[in-house]
Structures are given as C-alpha cells and as structure tokens.
Amino acid sequence: MALGKYASGHEGDAPVIAFSPRKTALTFYVYSETEKSKLGVADLDKFKMSKACIHVKKLSDIDIVALKEICLESIKYISEHHECSCRLK
C-alpha cells in the first residue's frame, strides 16, 4: 500500500498496482508517468488509457511482457516517490 496525497489535500492508502476485471474491459491500475512507462505503453498494442489505468478487452490484445515492465516501473516509481509499505521490511 502507498499513502497518496493529492493537490486537493485529500490523502489515503491505495494499492501500489491493482487489477479489476470489469464487464466491458480488464482494467490495470499500473501506470506511473515515467519515460520507461511511456515507452512500454507504445509496445502494448490494443488498449485504452485513462490517467493511471490501462483498459483492455482481452489479454491476448496486449503484449504481456510490456505490461509486466510497466508494472515493475510503476512499483519502482511509487516506492521511490511516495510513503509506501512496499519499502517496509
């Protein structure tokens, strides 16, 4: 879990990365806006993007290796830039 604080002053715990199988699409809450993530998204193939989410109709539509790299980059970014239980031992 990571502690997030927004410009509005709102703060709270959130998972570092997450997945939600929805009726219309599979949603991956994995994106951190880094150069490496931007390059990884370019390799995904068929997807839609929102602020921090990648939406796909089916897993076969995307490059799983690229998704894995985006996930790892997001975990790294969150652990370096936010208070995160992923750093706690």
Image: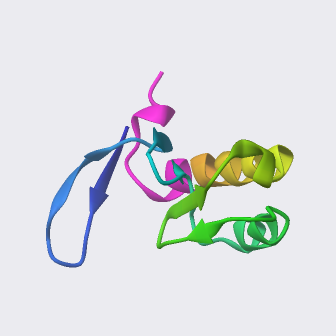
Residue 38, compared with residue 59, is above or below; it is below
The foreground one among 57 and 81 is 57
The spot of residue 55 in percent (x, y) is 57, 59
The foreground one among 38 and 81 is 38
Query: Does the segment drawn in magenta span residue 33?
Result: no
Q: Residue furthest front?
A: 23
Can you tell which quarter of the image residue 47 is in? bottom right
Residue drawn 44% across the image and 28% down it: 88
Residue 61, compared with residue 50, is above or below; it is above
Residue 2, compared with residue 39, is above or below; it is above
Residue drawn 74% across the image and 67% down it: 41
Residue 30, compared with residue 8, is above or below; it is above
Say whether residue 79 is left or right of residue 39. left
Q: Residue furthest left?
A: 9
Residue drawn 60% across the image and 70% down it: 48
Say whether residue 65 is left or right of residue 28. right
Instruction: Name the magenta segment's main secondary structure.
Output: helix
The spot of residue 12 in percent (x, y) is 20, 50
The spot of residue 67 in percent (x, y) is 74, 50
| Quadrant where the image shows the N terminus | top left
Can you tell which quarter of the image residue 56 is in? bottom right
Q: Which residues are magenta?
A: 77-89
Say whether residue 32 is left or right of residue 24. right
